[in-house]
Amino acid sequence: MSFTTDIKQEIANVDLERHCQKAQLAALMLLTSSLTISGGNMGILVRSESPTTCKRAMYLLKKLFDVDTSLQVARKTNLKKNNVYTIQIEKGGVQILEELGLYSQRGLENHPSYDIVMRNCCAASYLAGAFLAYGSCNDPQNNNYHLEIALQEIEYANFIVKLISRFDMQAKIVKRRNSYVVYLKKADYVSDFLALIRAHDAMMRFEDERIARDLKNSVSRIDNCEIANVEKSIRAGQKQIAAIEAIKLAGKYDKLNEKLKNVAEIRLRYPEASLLELCEAYQSNYGEAISKSGMKHRLNKIGSYADSLEE
């Protein structure tokens, strides 16, 4: 199963208070349902390609309104040939939508009335319903963190963005073909959203994968840094040894003072050693402590003297 499917199954099994159930069902109805007229009765059709979403909608309808529903399953004729699940409610469609804050004297509303999402817990349940309807989230093994809800109307997309911002998350909107996609990209936002809609197992899995990846990346950066430092030390050592050999070849080695000769001998003895390792070797051989800056200064003097001989 996909990560998105796991999230939907988890939030579809969350026990909610009645007011939060109404908020979640309001989102599902707004995004997946349409009104029908048959024999003078106003009914509702709910369509979804997700069996989890359809099952949750049926459960909430039965729990809140005790309505009779029928379920039909059909296979799409496009290339994917996914199943389409349809819930039919033959009577009382308007009353249900009115109760959910989706129908008024003006007709169907493009977002629920404020009292449906007034409480933060209801707003979170509403967002969970929106995700159930048309949400998706990248697998946490993918380092491209991305959670989105695809919507048909820009007004409704703005409503969802505003609802998300109530919880200190910055969602953005992008136009994709015939949809307006509300999305979160930052890993912290994705994690916070999963926690908000009470997909706690999915959130923990997301965080585990994220921590493991960040740790791996940190180790890789440290390893790369150490390799770079070793390569830098080797190149510097080769250059310093070449300078010492040039001084010897010119017959000027005895012109160096004792301290420079000692440094030169240590460098020749340990051609791949770092500055710190050269300092330790110098103290061990000559009984005199020397700092890294002191070692570097003496090696630079040897290099400068070799350059002057070439000139």
Image (cartoon, helix red, strand yellow):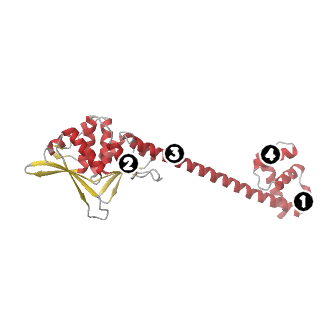
Instruction: Give me the residue at 82% from left, 42% from top.
Output: 289
First along the sequence among labels 1 and 2: 2
Quadrant location, the C terminus: bottom right
Percent position (x, y) of residue 41?
A: 10, 48
- The disc labelled 4 sits on which kind of residue? Glu
Q: Mark 2 points at which residue?
A: 6
Between 50 and 176, the one lying in front of the other is 50
Instruction: Give me the residue at 84% from left, 44% from top.
Output: 284
Instruction: Give me the residue at 37% from left, 46% from top.
Output: 7
Instruction: Give me the residue at 23% from left, 45% from top.
Output: 58
Which element carries disc 2, helix, strand or loop?
A: helix
First along the sequence among labels 4 and 3: 3
First along the sequence among labels 3 and 1: 3
Percent position (x, y) of residue 189?
A: 42, 44
Q: Name the residue under label 1.
A: 252
Q: Name the residue under label 4.
A: 280
First along the sequence among labels 1 and 4: 1
- The disc labelled 2 sits on which kind of residue? Asp
Check whether the beta carbons of the residues at disc 3 and disc 1 lie within 8 A of each other: no
